[in-house]
Each structure stands twice: as C-alpha cells, then as structure tokens.
Amino acid sequence: MAINMHKIGIQSTGTIRQENIDEGYRIIKAAGFDCVDFNFDEYLAVNDVRAGKIHDFFDRPIDEMWKDFEPHARAAAEYGLTFEQMHAPFPMMLPGKESINEKMCRITINCMELCTRMGGRYIVVHPTTLAYEYSRRDEHDFNVSMYQELIPAAKKLGLVVCLENLFVEQNGHLMEGACSDFQEAVNIIDKLNQLAGEELFGFCFDIGHANILGKNMYQSVVALGNRLKILHLHDNDGMSDLHNMPFTFARSWNPVATDWAGFLRGLKEIRYQGVINFETFRCMQGFPIELHPSLLKLQADMGRYFSSQI
C-alpha cells in the first residue's frame, strides 16, 4: 500500500463548539484527521463587515486576544493536531469605505499574528470582487494594492497569504468573482511575490466555487501549478454553495456534479503536497451532533483516498 504523503484536515466551523472545545478536537483526532483549518471568520460575519458593524473582538491587544484562542491551541496539541491553514474575516477592503478598510486591515494583521501563534503556515484572505461599474483592471489594481498592505506582516511572521477563487450573485445569476479567472489569479500572485521579493502569496483552490461557475477542474489546477498551496474541498449541485461532502451529487444523474476525477488528476500532475482539507461546515451543521464522529470518519477516509489518487 502506498504511504500517504498528505496531511488530512477539516475546518473548525461546524465541528468545534466554543462551549465544549476539548470534545471537538477529540472527535476530529479520533476520526483520523491530522490538522484543523481554523476559521477566524466565524467570529466576525461578512454581512456585519459590509454594513460597517465591526466589533472589537479582533481589535484588541494581541495578548488579550490570545486568551480566547490559547484553549484551542492547547486542546489541539493535547490530541496531536496541528493548524496548517486558517481563514481571516472578510472582506478585508471595499472601495470607498476607508474607515472600514483601515480597521479590517488591522484585524487581518492581528489574525495573521494569531495564526502564527497557533502554528499556522497559511492564511486565506479573500480578494475583493468589485461591482460591475468597475473594470477587471480596476479589480486587479485594487487587489494588488490591498494585499501589498500585508507584505510587512507576512515577512515578519513567515506566513503565506492565500487568495481564493470567488463567485458573486448578480440579479439571480451566479457570476465570476475575483480570482475565478485562474490566469488572472496567477498574474496577481506573481506580481505580489515580485513586489515582496519572496514567496509570501499563494492560492487556496475552492472546488465548490469552481464547480458553481462550471470551471474545468483539471485545467484550473494545472494553471495554478505550484502557486496552489491549500484547498477548500466540498461539494454542491452546481447551482448553490452548499458545502456538502464530496461525492454527494453523483455524476451519473447530475451532469453538473463536481469532476473529482479531473481535480485529482490535476493535483497529481502538479505534484500537490499540501493538506487535503475539507470545508464542509454546512454538511456538519445539517447532521445531528451524535452522528458527527461517523461523519468525520467518512470524510477522513475520503481524504486518504484523495491522497492515494494523487
């Protein structure tokens, strides 16, 4: 039997409950996972950010914030789990919202500091999708300028900031969001790394977002190449961002189901060595807590299957 070279991970949202932190990490480890993708974005909702209702939870002295997250670090260490990647609150910046942008930039850098304290190597910071009155060039320039603000912190902390492919809803239609054009994503990452003078930026491939937009999985992964550092793995019906388990929507009856075979073939071609990480929080939230151990074990088994195919 081939030896798996990939760590298998699952996001914290949907599994780690604040009222019983220890139990969450215990069942993740018992299910067969190696690491946790920690969701800082669970603590600050996207709609609140957009509305300018940004509380001060992440805008405090770092040592004070650490008191809230140290129990997670301690519980993970007790069960032999690591934090390989994390997700910052979003959006980090919006055009014309300077007061929001200043605070969210500070919050993002604070989350980067927390990420390092918890042992993380990668942090996802969403790019900004501009409204349709802006051009793609405007969007490119806005995001390059936004991410440049993070270069000093990334250098100091030794973190890699990961962009992610997004979608947007427009008049009832699902449309391409920032970095869903993978050649454009490559251009932004390469430009940022050139500006930084070292590799401080990479990519988080969200297969669910790609599936909604009808992307060719194999071609998308290959286009990203070695810039692809981390994954968000989940499934949907090709129409909604459902965050379900892989293989939930079988291709035999659903022609828009996720092309997992093409995706794995792409990962194999680029020799992907990162974490096989699941972002299936809605699936977890949909099942009774009593079934979570079984549900987690199945996903860990899927991760090992993916690793064997790559």
Image: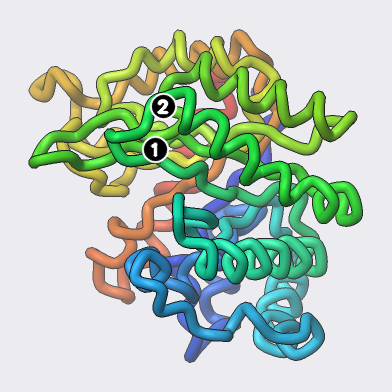
User: For the point 66% across and 27% down, which residue is it?
Assistant: 189
Q: Which residue is mark 1?
A: 166
**Residue 187 locus on image (x, y percent):** 61, 18
Contact (Cβ within 8 Å) of mark 1 with mark 2: yes
Residues 220 and 61: in front is: 61
Within 10 angstroms of label 2, few (less than 14), some, or many (20 or more) residues? many
Amino acid beneath label 2: Ser
The C terminus, quarter of image: top right
Q: Earlier in the sequence, mark 1 or mark 2?
A: 1
Horizontal side of residue 137 vs 169, given as left or right = right
Residues 116 and 104: in front is: 104
User: For the point 38% across and 40% down, which residue is it?
Assistant: 130
User: For the point 24% across and 38% down, which residue is it?
Assistant: 236
Amino acid beneath label 1: Leu
Q: Which residue is mark 2?
A: 180
Q: Which mark is residue 241?
A: none
**Residue 254 locus on image (x, y percent):** 11, 24
Q: Name the element at disc 2.
A: loop
Residue 260 seen in the figure: yes
